[in-house]
Image: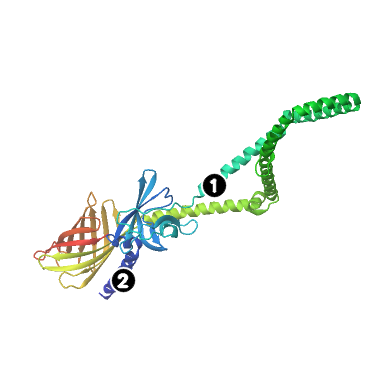
């Protein structure tokens, strides 16, 4: 009997520790917090990486959770549940933040000076809080890509002009024509008389064209400013574009030289086959580790814990007894433990059964109310009705003690219990009713 009492105290202590950790878990705290929060809505252009049950923080302190995320037109509508003790003002803003550089995402409530109001109002339950869109690296990358494409287009255009054979020939012909005109003028000037007549004619023509020259000078000045002006002009733009292209070409040449010489991580990777093989082996090891972790996760997900507190009322004895239960189920075995009060003496009785689940049946054997026995459990279709049969105290005179319990699930955490205690004993049979709370 002392061993049984020690075993019972050990199981009770284990159950108490397990119950403490269950209560301390985040999910249990969130369950107990229902009814103590009010909803607030926020709209974001993108909530990539956000998930339900993500925290809502104010100055780094958690004040609520994200309860629901859904589409509202072209934006994402986020429903947040805020603690009743926190009042948000309408000059607050919501932003999606990240813990660290690539950590989990959450909703941060911020108050900034540019949004301050003299007399801000309190956001009522069900109201909407304004948002600040986070910095988007993809948009910045797209702008840099557009700049790079335009630079490539300018480079191609200049290359076409320089490499065009027709442009080269036209430029050479222009220089030849200038040389020919220079020779002709020299020959004319050598002839004095002819040169004098030509100069007189040129003087007359110059007088007639004086007004035209003034207009032409103004036009030339405007054209010169448009083509080669210091602040704006085609030549200035071409010189700047040429300078940028030369700088880009020099940078690319330097990078290419460093890669060929094996400088930097990328250069060593290209030149050192051993380093490449090590990286390949490391990637294979990481993939193997991920597969092992996935297998272990599936094994842990298959383990189910059930705990309950229930109260049974014996109609003939007119007595109520409390009880605690803890069950652990895996695909390969089943463990059922519990602590009950004896309906006659009130002394504590301990249960510890080990067994296996086969289809709708669960069979087990071990300690039942501090005595050796066996149990059979039947889960009826629909998973709302369960029938338990316990047989123990085989050493007593007459029939062993047979206990039957029918459990009906009113909800996920509440069950109605009815059955017979000591069913085979004439005159000592007890009909009992009870209610069970647990998971």
Give the x, y percent position of residue 369.
Answer: 22, 67
| Quadrant hosting residue 429 | bottom left
Position above or below: 210 against 136: above
Residue lying furthest left: 427
Q: Secondary structure at mark 2?
A: helix
- Number of on-image labels: 2
- Across and down, in percent, residue 61 comes to 40, 64
Residue 242 placement (x, y as % from top left): 68, 42
Q: Is residue 396 visible?
A: no
Q: If the image is split into quadrants, where does the C terminus sit?
A: bottom left
Residue marked by disc 1? 141
Residue 302 position (above or below residue 8): above
In which image quadrant can residue 58 be found? bottom left
Name the mark nearer the viewer: 2 or 1: 1
Q: Position of residue 157 (x, y in %)?
A: 66, 35
Which numbered circle lies on residue 13? 2
Element at label 1: helix
Q: Residues within 10 Å of mark 1 (few under 14, many from 20)?
A: few
Between the C-alphas of marks 2 and 1, the distance is: 59 Å
Q: Horizontally, is 325 left or right of 180 in the view?
A: left
Depth check: give the residue in front, 155 or 265: 155
Side of 193 where 110 appears, left or right = left
């Amino acid at each position: 009997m002392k061993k049984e009492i020690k075993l019972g105290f050990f199981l009770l202590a284990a159950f108490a520790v397990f119950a403490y950790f269950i209560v301390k878990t985040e999910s249990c705290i969130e369950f107990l917090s229902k009814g103590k929060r009010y909803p607030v809505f926020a709209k974001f252009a993108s909530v990539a990486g956000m998930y339900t049950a993500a925290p809502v923080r104010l100055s780094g302190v958690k004040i609520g959770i994200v309860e629901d995320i859904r589409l509202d037109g072209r934006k994402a509508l986020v429903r947040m549940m805020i603690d009743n003790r926190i009042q948000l003002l309408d000059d607050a803003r919501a932003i999606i933040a990240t813990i660290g550089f690539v950590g989990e995402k959450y909703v941060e409530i911020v108050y900034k000076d540019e949004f301050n109001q003299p007399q801000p109002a309190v956001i009522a339950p069900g109201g909407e809080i304004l948002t600040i869109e986070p910095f988007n690296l993809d948009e910045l990358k797209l702008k840099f890509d557009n700049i790079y494409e335009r630079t490539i287009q300018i480079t191609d255009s200049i290359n076409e002009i320089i490499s065009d054979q027709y442009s080269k020939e036209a430029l050479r012909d222009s220089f030849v024509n200038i040389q020919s005109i220079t020779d002709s003028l020299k020959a004319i000037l050598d002839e004095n008389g002819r040169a004098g007549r030509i100069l007189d004619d040129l003087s007359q023509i110059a007088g007639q064209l004086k007004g035209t020259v003034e207009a032409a000078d103004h036009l030339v000045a405007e054209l010169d400013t448009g083509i080669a002006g210091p602040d704006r002009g085609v030549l200035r733009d071409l010189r700047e574009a040429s300078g940028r292209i030369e700088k880009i070409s020099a940078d690319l040449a330097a990078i290419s030289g460093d890669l060929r010489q094996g400088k930097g991580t990328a250069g060593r990777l290209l030149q050192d086959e051993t380093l490449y093989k090590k990286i390949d082996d490391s990637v294979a090891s990481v993939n193997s580790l991920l597969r092992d972790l996935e297998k272990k996760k599936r094994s842990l997900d298959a383990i189910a814990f059930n705990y309950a507190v229930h109260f049974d009322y014996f109609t003939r004895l007119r007595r109520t007894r409390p009880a605690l239960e803890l069950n652990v189920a895996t695909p390969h075995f089943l463990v059922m433990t519990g602590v009950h009060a004896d309906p006659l003496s009130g002394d504590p009785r301990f249960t510890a059964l080990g067994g296996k689940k086969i289809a709708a049946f669960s069979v087990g054997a071990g300690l039942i109310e501090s005595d050796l026995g066996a149990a059979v459990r039947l889960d009826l279709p629909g998973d709302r009705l369960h029938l338990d049969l316990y047989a123990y105290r085989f050493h007593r005179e007459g029939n062993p003690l047979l206990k039957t319990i029918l459990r009906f699930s009113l909800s996920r955490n509440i069950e109605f219990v009815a059955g017979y205690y000591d069913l085979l004993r004439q005159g000592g049979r007890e009909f009992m009713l009870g209610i069970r709370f647990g998971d």
